[in-house]
Each structure stands twice: as structure tokens, then as C-alpha cells.
Amino acid sequence: PGGGPPTREAPVGGFEINDFPPPDGARPRAPAATVEVVKLAGGEVGRYTFQPGWRWSEHIKPVVGTETCQAEHIGYLVSGVMGVRTEDGTTGEVRPGSAYHIAPGHDGWVIGDDPVVVVEFQGAATYAKQ
């Protein structure tokens, strides 16, 4: 007993914590987007913040050079509203409190005047990388 909680430097068998402030890494800042990544359990968890007016096809496409986002996303939307359109034309909205899966081949954008904040459990390792 004792000793306080595990730290990011010394994970204790089966229990590991990592904090976003400061993140382990961040993608080069794209206009209207912040991507922070922490390493956890051999993987990466991402916290993305997208400002009003952000759209993947306008802000990230020039960075990665693909027609649509090729990352697979599994996450949770904390705040704001995000629109999604898949290559087959399916559209939808992700709202606060929703868990989501978005397959590769899509566009995404902020709907409304509030920033979108998401936490992703899959997709952080490759999102917005050249």
C-alpha cells in the first residue's frame, strides 16, 4: 500500500496512466485543428480539437495527399457537432456523448459555431500524418 498513483514514467503492472497536458506528441498544427497524442498500453489515444469552419477536405487533405481520410476512427465525441460523409455518399452527424466508428474513405467537418472535441482510441497513430 501507499506510494500514490502510478506515474507516466513508472506504470505499475496492469495499471497505466498518461495525461494529455503535456501530450507525448502532437501533429504539425493544421489550420483550425489541434491533434494531441498520448501513448498508453502499447497504443496511442488522441484528443482532437477542430475549430468552427474546419473541414478535412480543406485542411488535412493537402497535408496527407489523399482524396478522402484513410484513417479508421473509433472514438467518443465530447463536445460540438461533427458531420461525416463516406465515399459511398452516406452522411451523418456525430453529437456529444456519442461513441463512433468511421471507416477509411470519408470527409468530416465541424457543424455550427462550437469547436468539436473528440477522444479517439483507434486512428490516432496515423491521423494527419504525411
Image (cartoon, rainbow, N blue to C red):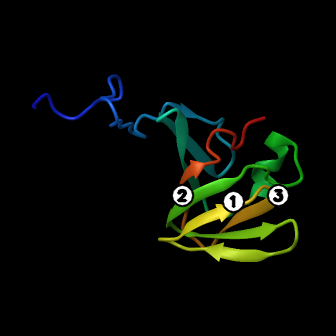
Say which residue appears at 56% left-offset and 52% top-offset.
120
**Circle 1: element type:** loop
Figure quadrant of the C terminus:
top right
According to the picture, the residue beneath numbered tag 2 turns out to be 118
Task: Return the residue at label 1.
Answer: 54
Residue drawn at point x = 64 percent, y = 40 percent: 29
As drawn, is 12 to the left or to the right of 75? left
Spatial CA span between label 1 and label 3? 18 Å
Ranked by sequence position, the earlier of labels 1 and 2 is: 1
> Disc 2 versus disc 3: distance between alpha carbons?
19 Å
* 60 relative to 129, above or below: below
On screen, residue 54 above or below 130:
below
Q: What residue type is labelled 3?
A: Gly
Q: What crowding class fits label 1: few (fewer than 14 Cα within 10 Å), some (14-19), or many (20 or more)?
A: many
Q: Position of residue 113 (x, y in %)?
A: 58, 71
Residue type at mark 2: give it: Val
Disc 2 is placed on an element classified as strand
Q: How far apart are marks 1 and 2 (CA)?
A: 14 Å
**Does the CB distance between marks 1 and 2 fall below 8 Å?**
no
Dot 1 amino acid type: Trp
Please name the residue that numbered disc 3 is placed on.
Answer: 105
Residue 101: x and y in percent read 64, 62
Q: 65 or 121, which is in the foreground?
A: 121
